[in-house]
Image (cartoon, rainbow, N blue to C red):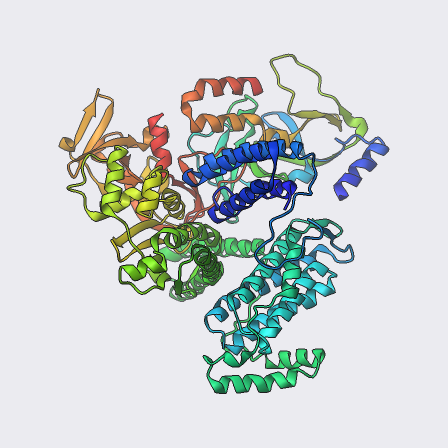
Amino acid sequence: MNLNHLAISLIELDPENLPELDGFKKNLILFKEQAKGHLKDVLGQACAEVEAWSGQDPESRQAGIVRLGELLEQAMEFSGGSPSIAKPEKPRDVPPETAGSRNITLSKDFDSELLNEFIIENMELVNMAESAILDWEKNPDNQELLNTIFRSFHTIKGTASFLNLDCVKDMAHHSESMLAQVRDDQENFTTGHADLALKSLDMIKSILERMKSSGPGQQIELTLGHEELLEALKNFSSGTQNPKVDNRSAEPVRERRVKERRVRKNGETSADQSFAASQAPDPVADSTVRVKIDRLDKLLDTVGELVIAQTMVGQDELIVGRKHHELNKKISQAGKIVRELHDLSLILRMVPLKGTFQKMARLVRDLSQKNGKIVNFITEGDDVEIDRNMVDMVADPLVHLIRNAVDHGIETPEERRRIGKSSDSRLYLTAGHAESSIILTVWDDGQGLSRQKIVDKAMERGLIDSAERMTDQEVWQMIFQPGFSTAEKVTEVSGRGVGLDVVRKAVEALRGRIEVQSSEGKGCAFIMKMPLTMAITDGMVVKVGSQRYILPTANIQKAVRPAEFDIHTVNQRAEMFSFRDELLPVFRLHRLFDIQDAKTQLTSGLLVVISEGPHRYALFVDDLLTQTQVVTKSLGKGINDVSVVAGGAIMGDGTVGLILDAAGIISMAHD
Amino acid sequence: MNNATVVKEDQSIKVDHRAGKYLTFFLDREEYGVEILKVQEIIGRMPITPVPLTSKYILGVINLRGKIHPIMDLKIKFGMDQTQITDETCIIVIKTARLMMGVLVDKVSEVVNVATEDIEDTPSFGADVNTEYLLGVGKTGGRVRLLLDIEKIITASDIIHLKKAAETSGQKPKAEKNQIQTN
């Protein structure tokens, strides 16, 4: 590693990714140790900068990265651009790096469609192999998992060589050969094998991702370390030859494997064939079709229109008013089918959480290795389905929570033994349904939250005066306060609080809620409850004059017809409504929106009590009409983004209804 | 790619880029034209849902086969009287690369082919009349048609200024100033 590489990896640093930052720090320090004279001074400053990171939030870290960049630039000047400073060897016996980075060119002979197919297909294979490796690590004797891994690498190799993508092909090939040593019992399986195989999958994945953003005939740059990894794969040996010691495995299994292997050893090609033959059909392999998302959306739109058209036919006065019994029957029959079609179309967008859970499994593996903790990661309900658009949004808070749990929540094995727990900890990630919501739980049996520490911190920050009357739940809620996390002490001692406000925000963006349950010394659980899909909003239709608006049910606490004595005025202008001993500000929708034909007498209309985050207020409307479920749509570009309107929805009569944004109303009323 | 080559050819044979087919329509008694390629469809009037806090010329939104599109009253935009709804009132749905928007017009007239020699540049009227939105004037069959730069009209920057105004209405006066400038 020379200064250049250091600078490049600095650019790629993600200020939120702590392990990555840590790795960078180590490299920098090693590098400093080898430097001389003035260069060493500059690098010393850089190291000081890096040291400060651990106690900072990502934003100031970002600023730190910028400063560091300047320091490195200085350092590069001093070193006269000579990249000759020896690189600290990685612990593995990797030969000195050949070329830092290499470019490969995608052949022009293949059109972008073909390349896309290749990318999608191989991404799936990579993911499949990754999850198989993670499982295999737990049951090294499972032949089927090993086969899956081989199959994936083999197919990747095959398709890559078809596209002349040598970098991918070699990577897959060497991984395959490395694993073959395990398969052929020349070596025992070790985590080293899994490490390398996972690394090569990461490498392939990153190449695929780069390919995604470029087209035929374009160049893609290989990541640093590509060559090293190849070499490591070629030379890898765990030093655990002689498989006889493998006495854990049940003998019958071994024998069967040996038999199978004999068939394969007749040569490469026949081995491959026997591979194909041994691909026992997955018992629950669903066949799927890949559909372009815009086609799917179009289909959903059209079905939505059909529902409306059907309703309009059903409500036509010709049909409702008179007695066409036969016609009525036919129409209601058609209506049933249309509704069924609508329900079907809605689940088309749903995908299982499996992929997300898999990513978490990988995360846990890497984190626990890094922290020297033994974590049994147990998932449940990875077949629960969730709206496609939400999958990525769900992953972010999960990563945060799992990282928290492994980094801070779970104790080190020694610590666990000391306090009488079993040295391997458990971390659960479960998903399940409840009504029309999905519930995700991250639960660890670590040290839990410390009430005292949190209370102390909150008092120090002036959030509360005394915690005497606070329930545990109220105390736990405080860890979601923004800024609560930046306090280093709480983060490290109580173990929680790293970016939990970020988690809460992410969950709220999904219209969900997050709760904590904790028992000190025993563990901590984060429970997230969110709707199955973002596409559908439960709402109440309210009437203001001749206008109708939709209020999200999630924000509505209660609707009341106020009595005279519940209303209090301030300066004869602002109004307040006393609701359960609490005074809420009254916002009149007709005034905010300047609607002329609405009711103006508070006592003749309705006050809807809205809660939005910490805020509560009473919204004055004429009347509450009906409950509805609507599909949220954008109002279209070309119209200003009105913050009070969250979107539009097609109503039962085919007109557009506006969905109001509870937070937007507050900010509007305050202006 | 294709577009680029077409443009190149056009320039080489010196055809006015404004020449082509126009859909013409009336606002009061004035006849306007929009490039036919930018017209998605013409629909009759339909219920429009007003959206609060938008500019006056944005009448609201409609549901067009499951998609929501905003509707603009061109006459308000041009500083004329608000459109009176009659049986002949139509919505022309304009589609540009960026967005789709319906414009309300009094009456749709016809599709005409405007050749290069029929197009004149817009004369200047001074500060009173804003000719920024006009591509030129087309004179065919003894009639004068004002050729609109419809893309410019529906993406005009005053929309953006108003957006800011809606977000922080504390800055309303400033936004209004901006509007005057852009109009």
Percent x, y for residue A190?
52, 69
Percent x, y for residue A452?
22, 44
Q: Nearer the viewer, residue A177 or A121?
A: A177
Tell me if residue A392 comes above or below residue A139 in the rendering.
Answer: above
Tell me if residue B61 comes above or below residue A268 in the rendering.
Answer: above
Q: Give the total of numbered labels.
A: 0
Percent x, y for residue A416?
31, 60
Percent x, y for residue A117?
65, 60
Q: State the image quarter where residue A81 is shown.
A: top right
**Residue shown at the point (25%, 31%) measured from the top left:** A585
**Residue shown at the point (60%, 13%) measured from the top left:** B128
**Residue shown at the point (15%, 35%) measured from the top left:** A563
Q: Is residue A83 left or right of residue A609?
A: right
Q: Nearer the viewer, residue A328 or A63?
A: A63
Q: Is residue B103 visible?
A: no
Screen quadrant of the C terminus of chain A: top left
- Which residue occupies the extreme front position in the image? A37
Tell me if residue A260 comes above or below residue B159 in the rendering.
Answer: below
Q: Is residue A163 left or right of residue A309?
A: right
Q: Nearer the viewer, residue A482 or A102?
A: A102
Q: Is residue A161 left or right of residue A497?
A: right
- Which residue occupies the extreme right position in the image? B13
- Which residue occupies the extreme top position in the image? B126
Tell me if residue A591 comes above or below residue A27 in the rendering.
Answer: above
Q: Is residue A610 visible?
A: yes
Q: State the image quarter where residue A236 is shown.
A: bottom right
Q: State the image quarter where residue A78 is shown.
A: top right
